[in-house]
Amino acid sequence: MSTLEIRKASITDLGTDAVVNAANEGLWAGAGVCGAIFAAAGHAQLEEACGRIGHCDTGSAVITPGFRLAKYIIHAVGPRYSDGRHREAELLYGAYKRSLELARDHECLSIGFPLISAGIFGYPVEGAWQEAIKACTDFLNENPDYDIRIVFAILSDEIIECGKSVLDGMSAHDAGTDGAAVKRSDWKNVDMPDARDAFILKRAFSKKEMMALRKGHIPEAMEDKWFWYMEGDTLYIHRSWTGFCIYIAELSDGYTHKVTVNRDPEQYVSEGAEADCERLNKLLDYMIKQPFDYYTEWIEETADSIKKAKKGE
């Protein structure tokens, strides 16, 4: 039976068949987790093995012998975090998935991970946990006949608590739904045009509300007018019928969040930033309730549109 756990430990002390190194594209020895792994495995031998491979793309992984440390060392290259809009979530997810595929292909029964990209690469810790746990659970679901013990080795109590919170939340979500969080590719979508504006949304989100947003939503009926998903800490909200992206919200841990709004009049009719903020707040009120009451939201939005049309007569 496969298991996934978060443990307070050094990654060099796990005793797993495979140990994952948070690597760079050049596979050079570095500091932190990377430096500790090189030292424990034998710097000269591991450096020579990495030199023979030479390169690994961001979002992927390669494998070498583990020498003194383990049977194998898997070198996974996570992304440097910019703003959440440069495929960071996709690349981080890919680094984990490829690592697990290599472990499976080399018949490993256990694997130890650090929290990739959450150190000097700057990925927000909660978002890094989201992609790590999502990739692991997706892999386990896709490989039901392969048993592996997955261990995350973390030294910080705060990071461990965050990881356990994300793991508990995703486990609760999976128990009540049919699968993992919604992804961009799950529904038709069109990138936001250059005609756009921005405003600051002021509201706080509880952990439960963030879980509802991270779950995402795939439209279920004609009256269901919205498709949304998250990548890292960025929320993308699209019209379901057209796929047009209407809002991009960069969600923070605090009370203020930057929102970019579509300003193409052929895609979205706006009455200004204040009206957009009010409309988004109403929509979020519906989105964070589970299940999403799309029919009532549709009735309310339609009624508002009729009132505005009558005022303009």
Image (cartoon, rainbow, N blue to C red):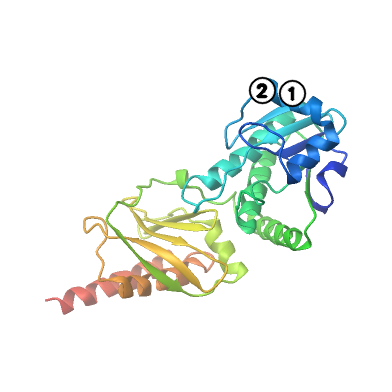
Say which residue appears at 61% left-offset and 68% top-offset. Answer: 208
Q: Position of residue 48 (x, y in %)?
A: 75, 23
Question: Is 77 drawn above or below residue 157 in the view shown?
Answer: above
- Image quadrant holding the N terminus, namely top right
Tell me where residue 46 sits by quadrant: top right
Q: Position of residue 261 (x, y in %)?
A: 34, 62
Label 2: which residue?
53
| Residue 132 in view in this figure | yes
Say which residue appears at 25% left-offset and 71% top-offset. Answer: 271
Q: Which sits in the foreground, 232 or 302?
A: 232
Q: Amino acid at mark 1?
A: Ala
Q: Amino acid at mark 2?
A: Ile
Q: Are marks 1 and 2 in contact (CB under 8 Å)?
A: yes
Q: Position of residue 248 (x, y in %)?
A: 41, 59
Q: Residue 49 has which mark?
A: 1
Disc 2 is placed on an element classified as helix
Q: Is residue 146 left or right of residue 296?
A: right
- Image quadrant holding the C terminus, namely bottom left
Question: Is 283 drawn above or below residue 264 in the view shown?
Answer: below
**How far separated are the C-alphas under marks 1 and 2?**
7 Å
Q: Which sits in the foreground, 2 or 156?
A: 156
Tell me where residue 296 sits by quadrant: bottom left
Q: Residue furthest bottom?
A: 311
Q: Is residue 37 left or right of residue 56?
A: right
Q: Residue furthest top?
A: 52
